[in-house]
Amino acid sequence: MPGDRKKTRYQAQIKTLSELARTTRDRLVPVLEGLERALPSDDGATPADDATAPAAATSADVESWRKAAAAAVEGFADPPSGETATNVARSSLASAVRQLATAVDTYAAAQKLTGSTREAVVDLAVRQALLAARPSV
C-alpha cells in the first residue's frame, strides 16, 4: 500500500535524523562546554575572576573544537531527499551546527586581537554561540 510505504519511509527518515542528531550532540558537547568556560556569559560576566586573565582555552583546545565542529558540519553535507518535516528539522539543525562552527572560528580570531577590538570580537562569538545553542533567542 502506498500509504504504508510513505509512513515507513518517513519513520526511516526520522530514525536517521535522530541518529545524526545524537552523533552531532556527542561531537559538539566538548565544544559547547569549552566555549562556555572560555567565553564571557551573555550577561557580561567573564569566565575568570580577573577580566584581564589570559583566555581559558589553549590553541590546542580551539583546534580540537574546530575539528569537532567541522566533522559535525560535514555530517550534514549532501542531505537526502525527505519529507518536508524532516527536511526542515535537518536544515534547522544544520544551521545551528554551522553557527557554532562560526562561533569557534570567531573565538579563534579574537585570540589574535587585543583591547577593545578583541572584546568586540569575543562579544560576537558569544552571540554566535548563543544563537547556535538557542536559535530562538
Image (cartoon, helix red, strand yellow):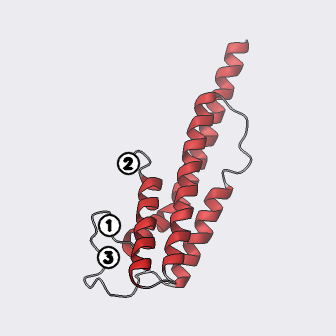
Classify 38 as above or below 78.
below
Q: Of the residues shown, which amino acid type is indicated by label 2?
A: Val
**Label 2, label 1: how many angstroms apart (C-alpha)?**
14 Å
The reply to whether discs 2 and 1 touch (Cβ–Cβ < 8 Å) is no
Residue matched to label 2: 137
Residue at the disc numbered 1: 41
The amino acid marked with disc number 1 is Ser
- Determine the secondary structure under disc 1: loop
Whole-percent x and y of residue 36? Answer: 38, 68
The numbered mark, 1 or 3, whose residue comes first in the sequence reads 1
The image quarter in which residue 11 lies: top right
Residue found 52% across the figure and 60% down from its top: 100
Picture coordinates of residue 131, whole percent (x, y): 44, 54
Q: Secondary structure at mark 3?
A: loop
- What residue do we see at 53% from left, 57% from top? 99
**How far separated are the C-alphas under marks 1 and 3?**
7 Å
Q: In the rendered view, would you say 19 is above or below 104? A: above
Task: For the residues labelled 1 and 3, say whether their Cβ atoms are less than 8 Å apart.
Answer: yes
Residue 55 picture quarter: bottom left
Under mark 3, the amino acid is Pro
16 lies above or below 73? above
Q: Residues within 10 Å of mark 2 (few under 14, many from 20)?
A: few
Residue at the spot 60% in from the left edge and 34% down from the top edge: 86
Across and down, in percent, residue 58 comes to 49, 84
Q: Which residue is mark 3?
A: 47
Is residue 134 placed above or below 127 in the rendered structure? above
Pair 2/3: label in front? 2
Say what secondary structure mark 2 lies in: loop
Query: What residue lies at 45% left-to-right and 67% top-to-bottom?
Result: 125
Q: Circle 3: is it few (<14), some (14-19), or many (20+) Cα within 10 Å?
A: some
